[in-house]
Image (cartoon, grey):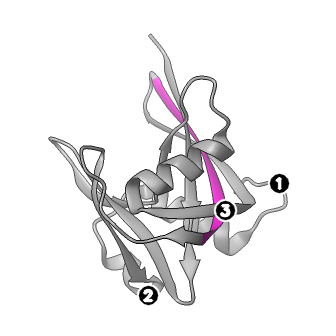
Amino acid sequence: MNRRRLAAYAMIVRGEDILLAHYVNAETRHWTLPGGGVEHGEDPYDAVVREVEEETGYTVVPEVLIGVNSFHPQPEFQAVRLFWEARVVGGELRFEVGGSTDRAEWFPLAEVAGLERSEVVDRGLELLRARPKSGHL
């Protein structure tokens, strides 16, 4: 049976730092972008705002849709991911309790390459740097 997951992520860069969330499950722990799955009937824009608040405590405004990416980690599964450049407008950094992440932190962009991270971070950074008019690399 084929499955598809729609997700929305925020690229939140402040100066030379990027905000990342630490994803945890029984098998995996890595840094990822704040964001996640779009619920049935939910607008992806609203989903990224909700997910960032859940995972980081921050209220954000998604300002620019910088791209779309499709990822096939298994033949029967496709992840379709939307990436927004977003700006923090309120809230305070805090950690998610009882969710898919256990903390959030600001990292210097120069240190991201050395982190144990999801490839979603790399795709988001590529889109942010390239800013393709089509939204696709």
**Which sits earlier in the primary sequence, circle 1 or circle 2?**
2
Establish if 114 lies above or below 117.
Answer: below
Check residue 14 for magenta coloring. no
Q: Tell me which residue sits at (57%, 23%) in the image.
A: 40
Residue on which the image places disc 2 = 110
Name the residue furthest top: 1
Establish if 24 lies above or below 133.
Answer: above
Asked if the residue under mark 3 is in contact with the one under mark 2, i.e. CB atoms within 8 Å, the reply is no
Residue on which the image places disc 1 = 134
In which quarter of the view is residue 93 placed? bottom left
Check residue 82 for magenta coloring. yes
**Secondary structure state at the residue bearing disc 1:** loop
Residue on which the image places disc 3 = 61
**Which sits earlier in the primary sequence, circle 2 or circle 3?**
3
Using the image, tell me which numbered label, if any, was put on residue 100. none
**Secondary structure state at the residue bearing disc 3:** strand
Magenta region:
77-88
Q: Tell me which residue sits at (40%, 62%) in the image.
A: 56
Residue 5 location (% of width, % of height): 51, 30
**CA–CA distance between discs 2 and 3?**
25 Å
- Left or right: where does residue 82 sit relative to residue 37? right
Q: Main secondary structure of the magenta part?
A: strand
In which quarter of the view is residue 81 placed? top right
Specify the amino acid type for callout 2. Ala
In depth, the one of 80 and 18 nearer the eye is: 18
Specify the amino acid type for callout 1. Ser
**Which sits earlier in the primary sequence, circle 1 or circle 3?**
3
**CA–CA distance between discs 1 and 2?**
27 Å
**Secondary structure state at the residue bearing disc 2:** helix
Please tell me how crowded label 2 is: few (under 14), some (14-19), or many (20+) other residues with Cα within 10 Å. Answer: few
In depth, the one of 92 and 77 nearer the eye is: 92
